[in-house]
Every structure is written in structure tokens, then in C-alpha cells.
Amino acid sequence: MQLTGADIVVKSLEAEGVEYVFGYPGGAALHIYDAFHRQQEVEHILVRHEQGATHAADGYARSTGKPGVVLVTSGPGITNAITGIATAYMDSIPMVVLSGQVMKPLIGYDAFQEIDAVGISRPCVKHNFLIQDVEDIAATIKKAFHIATSGRPGPVLVDIPKDITAHVAEFLYPTTVDIRSYPEVPKAQPAEISIAVEAVLNAKKPIVYAGGGVVLANAQAELRSMVRKLGFPCTNTLMGLGAYPHGDPLFIGMLGMHGTYEANKAMHDADLIVAVGARFDDRITGTLDGFAPNAKVLHIDIDPSVIDKNIKSDIAIIGDAKEVLELLNQEIARRESEINPELTKDWWSTIAEWQGFDSLWYEHSDTVIKPQFVVQKLHEVTGGEAYVTSDVGQHQMFAAQFYGFSDTHKWINSGGLGTMGFGLPAAMGVKFAHPDADVACITGEGSIQMCIQELGTCKQYDLPVKVINLNNRYLGMVRQWQEFSYEKRYSNSYMDSLPDFVKLAESYGHVGMKIESPADVEGALKEAFAMTDRLVFMDFITDREENVYPMIEAGKGHHEMRLRPNKK
Amino acid sequence: MRHIISVLLENESGALSRVAGLFSARGYNIESLTVAPTNDPTLSRMTIVTWGDERRIDQIEKQLFKLVDVAALQDITINRHLEREVVLVKVGLLGDPADSKLELERVTSVFNASLLDVTDTLFIAELSGSSEKVDEFIKALSAHTIVEVARSGVTGLSSTERALTAR
């Protein structure tokens, strides 16, 4: 079948089973947009800014496990998309970004809307391509999807010069892909498994530390089964929340900079850390000098480069988390009689003492809305079943600490890059993927204004997400750091001249609510979630100077947490 | 410690910038970097001279291997290996050109270097050898007026049976 390059692009997406493409048109992409107009199989979603397109595709990917797909034009189209591509890169999210490029003969001549897309994206993609010939389009898109979704996932950019999308070629979508220089994921060796199980069976102070890799590998069942069989305490990273369910007696909360007292203390005092799909980043470890001085580290990851990068491992197993955990579970089952709960009995008593401290405690108020309270009520009203996206800052940490996730793919946040503006467009992507589910975007008045234009997209496509704006009139996390480390010099951390969010939401055709009293929180949430066909923007006027506790400040270790000072 | 890492790279546009970008983005040192196609025109061979402790070199190798365009790599310094660098040195003739030429010819012959070009005022010599030998050659010539030096950077091969091959 002879087709234009533009039609080949769209047919290739169809062949990949792509449902939605999030994008924004422009000159260099117009042939492709014309091809979209000629078909109905792949739906194009028109966002309001290219950053929104990438975050929406990202939210779709995180909530489904399928790759998110983006289409933008050359020049500012691709530069606007960079923040979202980098966001996906840092959290290893599968994404394919197609960008229009100026015509091939114009490349290198500073043409209108020309930018070196391959060059500017190189540090924040898993791989990228500049297509040189119409004959290469289908095979390149096939490679892009393969690379984006296999191994440690990540975003892949395909840059397509405009003239090539007008050329004609035979369309035949490849069924296989062979990239000789792209490594296969190594398989765990039986010897490694047996050494690992030996260490696990002898641990007296073990902790299982599970990260986003467990979510990406869909390994939650295998993780849960291992943790329960061994009776070990389990902590999740910010990216791994839901991998082990909140509320389970073996779950000791999130760890890291704003993790629980018990999770961080347990990491510090452990004699064995079982790290699964986690990379010991600085927000997890605090200062490396004092990190877990007595722990043996068993590190399981699909990416060899994270092994021994920040923390030297004692036992490393490279492989897909699901497969490795399955092998570990088989070996543990074979040696089940050797599991001795007595070994960890003292460890559990120590952990219970730490838990008794109740480090997430905060003082309720009848007069001013506490942000934590809103998140707790959101959990109640949605039965803990909602998809929750967030932006970046205090509200993100309150959401992570207080929503209580029981399943993976439900907590959608920018953990690695820390991108403000992520929450609302990500929620759109989630809503496209899960139209019947409750989708809440927990945000702040600072973050929401970074991509607020997407309220227009939500209206156009009838996306009834619920925006939970925790409005403290400060860039709360910046203010908190300034309170702790800069003697309360609140340099540029306040939010002045805020819009009337209720009117703003209404002007886009949505429902706006302003909630100022703690007594109204639950009722307002119930009312909002009852409006299943409307986007409701809920502007919660919260305590101005509430802080996130516990906190490991920069340069401190797990044993040096700053705890809530007024705790009784 | 100094390490020489040989890399087989897909001969694709942009592959070199991926490697160079990786080194600058992650703050790795590059002492020299050479690249040229191999007998298989679809592959380039790159030789990177870098330094760092064991952990740093381990990271460099792992991060390089993560690049989709990298087909294979090997730290050739961990085994017996050969390294060669080519240098071209342009020297100005001083004082009595005849004496000066004689002295330069002597140095060149001691180092087993070749004379590529001699004019009334200039003398261009070529030497192939280890970086150490190249350093010494340049030092030996520094009694004269060195006009410019062009070094190729290091290339090398492991002397073991094992060859670096793409899958």
C-alpha cells in the first residue's frame, strides 16, 4: 500500500495500538495533522500547551503501563515539550514523542521554527531519531516503541522533517525489531538467587525497600507475596507507593526526606536492605556518609547502572523485578522451613516503639483547614480508590503521606524531576485511560498556575477530574526550607495577586468551590465527587504555615530527622 | 587511575554527541577521544582515555553501555594491551639552519620518528607511540621552537585473544 509519510506515521501508531495522541499542531507537523483528519482509529487530543501534552501522555502511561504518545511541531513545539519529556525520563516512563522538523534541505540554515530537536532532547531521552527518508518512518517508529517500553522504560523522540511526511512509500509495519546494539535484559542467575535467599533467611534486622521499578514491572503481587512469606517490614519510595499496600501491618510507611520515623530509622539500623526497583537517590538516602552503616545491601534492578552508583551493594541481581522476585519466591518456598520469625522478633519490637511515636501526627484545628486533613477526607470520600495526581511541593508530600495507596498505578507524581505543573495535565491523561474512575489532582496555588490553561482541554473533552487546590498563599515547600534554613527570610515564596479560582474555573465552564472551614471539607468533597460529569475546582484555603514532618534536611542522615516540635 | 575504554558504536549521525554529552553531563573526565569507522562500515570504533577510581570507571562503562548506539565496550587497560598515538610536530629552525637540522635529525632518529617535511625555516616530524613516548618526544624537541603540535589521541587494542565485537 503506497502512502504518504504522514499517513505512515498515523498508520504506524494505529499498528502500535495507540488510542490517544496528545499534541498541538504547527507548520512542520501539518502534513501529519492532515493525515489525522483522514482517519478515526487514533484520536488526537488537542491540549493548550505542549508541556501539557507530555504530562497528559505521561499520566496515561503511568496509570495504564502503556506508552504515552505525543505529537508536537518543530521549534517552540519541541522546546515546550522538553520539561515533560525530562519528567518522564527521570521517572522511567514509557513515552514516544513525535516532533515535526523543518524540511530536510532547510536543516542547519536557521529556518523558521528550526531547533535541533535531537540535540536539545538528548540528555533527557532514552534514545532519539531524526528520520532521513520516508522509507525509514515505519521501522523507526517500531524501534521507538520497542526502546520506550522495554528494559528500563523511558521517553524516545522521533523527529520527522516536513518534506519527508509528504513523500510516498510502501507501508508495511514491521512485526519484529532488531537493534543489535540494544542490550537484552539480563536474566538472574540461580547462584545469585541462592546467595540472596541465604542472606534473607539470616537477617535479624531486615527491611524491604521497594521503588518505582516494582510499579513499572507490575511486580506488586510478587513483592507482597515475598514480604508476607518472610514477615519483613516493608517501606515504599515516593515512586513506589501502592506497591505494598498502606494499612498492612508489615508496611512501615514511605521513607526518605519526608518519610516516616520508623521507615527511616529502620533503614538506618537495618542489617539487610532488600532494594527492589529503587535507586538510592539523594531524597531517599540523605547524606551518604551516615547511610545504613551496618546494612548488607541486596540490590535488585533492571538497570545495571544504578547498581553501585550511590550505594555499594553486597549482592546485586540485574533483571526484571517481577521475574527476579518470582525466582526469589520459589527459592524461599523451597527453603520455607528455614524461615525463623524469632530472628526478627526484637527488630519488630524496636520498630513498634518507633511507630508508637506517630511521626505523621499533626494538630487538628476547628478553625483553619489543615492540608493533611483534606487529604485524609479525600481518602474517605473516594474509598481510597481514586487515581491521585499531584504537582510538586508540600501538597505532594501530604498526598504521599496521607492518602494511603493500596494499589499501584494510582499515585501519579513527578518524583525525579519534581515538575510543578504536572498534576492537572497528568490527571487528564489518567481520565482518558480510566473514564469511570475518580481522578483527583492534589495541587497548590503555585503549581496549578503553571499549567492551568489545560482547564480548557478538560472542558473540550469533558474530563471531570477533581482539582484539590491546597491554597496556603505561599510556595509552601520553599517557605518551609526558608523557615528552617534561612531564618524565615521568605524570599519570593509568597503567592500574591492570586486569581479568584472559583471564577476562573467557572470562566472555563467548570464548577468552582471555595472551602474555608474545616467543617465544610467533607461535605464539599462529597458534593464534588457526586458531580460525576463535571470538573470541580476546589479551592481549599488552608493553614498558611503548616510544615511537612518528619524531614531529613539537606546534609543530614536517616537518624537525624527533624520531627514536629509541638507534638504532645 | 588512567583507563582506556574501547567502544564499538553504531556508525549513526549523532552517536558521537551522545558519548560526548554523557561525559560532560555526568562530569566524567576525557583525556582524549578518537573515533573512526572500522572494517565493518556500519560500526565505528571509539577509544576514550579517562581516569577515575574503580567505582567511577564502573559507572562510566555502565552508562556508556546504556546508550542505544553502543554495541560493545571493553576497558583494554585491565589486560595486556597496546596503545598508540600519532603526533605531528612543527618545529622552527633556529640559528644556523644546517646545525639546527642536524640536531633535529638526531632527535628524530633516536625516537624512531619520521621527517615529513623540511623547508629552510620549518621541520615537521611524525611519531607513533605510546602517549608517554609522545610526551618525551615533544619534550626532547622543546629545546627548539615548537610552532605547533597535533596529537591524534590514543587508540589501542587489547593483546588478548578476545576481540571487541558487536552481536
Image (cartoon, helix red, strand yellow):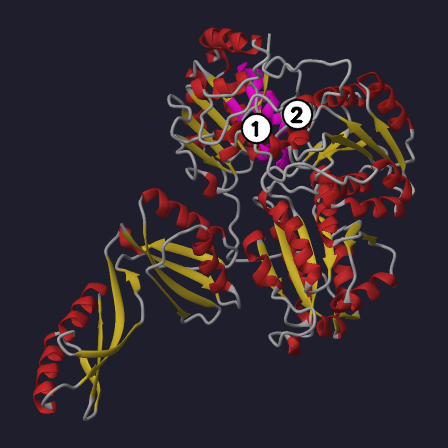
Q: Write down the residue under mark 1.
A: A483
Chain bearing mark 1 = A
As drawn, the label of residue A545 is 2
The quadrant where residue A329 appears: top right
Chain bearing mark 2 = A
* Residue A423 is a magenta residue: no
Q: Where is residue B12 in the image (x, y as percent from the top left)?
A: 52, 67
Residue ID at (71%, 46%): A55
Binning the other alpha carbons within 10 Å of mark 2 as few (below 14), some (14 to 19) or many (20 upward) gives some
Q: Quadrant of the C terminus of chain A?
A: top right
Circle 2: residue type: Glu
Q: Which of A533 and B44 is in front in this view?
A: A533
Residue ID at (9%, 91%): B98
Residue ID at (12%, 90%): B97
Q: Disc 1, disc 2: CB below 8 Å?
A: yes
Distance between the alpha carbons at the discs numbered 1 and 2: 9 Å
Please tell me whether residue A24 is drawn above or below residue B12 in the rendered image.
Answer: above
Q: Nearer the viewer, residue A353 or A243?
A: A353
